[in-house]
Image (cartoon, grey):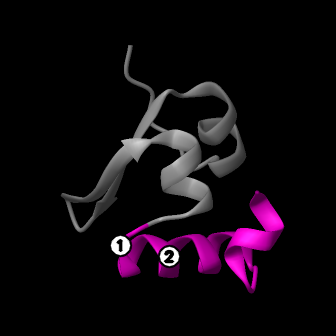
Amino acid sequence: MIKVTHGITFARESADHVAVFDQGAICEIGAARQAITAPKEERTQQFLQHVLHLSPLRKEIS
């Protein structure tokens, strides 16, 4: 099943894997918890910091 959401917490808790898109292309894909709590790609890090209004990212959503 594929779900599309902007709900970061929902995605982290309900999905096994996530894909993060930037301008129609996948910029990060992987296990949901890892991709959201410790993203590898700079664009994903920027997106999560913006959406979640957090700094530093990892301490707040781990």
Q: Tell me the quarter of the image containing the C terminus.
A: bottom right
At horizontal 76% and vertical 79% (from top left) the residue drawn is: 54
| Badge 1 element | loop
At horizontal 64% and vertical 71% (from top left) the residue drawn is: 51
Q: How many marks?
A: 2
Report the side of 34 relative to 27 (left or right): right
| Residue range corresponding to the magenta coloring | 40-62
Residue most extreme to the right: 60
At horizontal 71% and vertical 45% (from top left) the residue drawn is: 9
On screen, residue 47 above or below 4:
below
Find out whether residue 50 is within the magenta segment.
Answer: yes
Q: Which residue is mark 1?
A: 41
Report the side of 25 relative to 42 (left or right): left
Quarter of the figure with residue 2: top left
Out of 6 and 19, give the one closest to the viewer: 19
Q: Amino acid at mark 2?
A: Gln
Dominant secondary structure (helix, strand or loop) of the stretch shown in magenta = helix
Residue 11 circle label: none
Q: Amino acid at mark 1?
A: Glu
Q: Which residue is mark 2?
A: 45
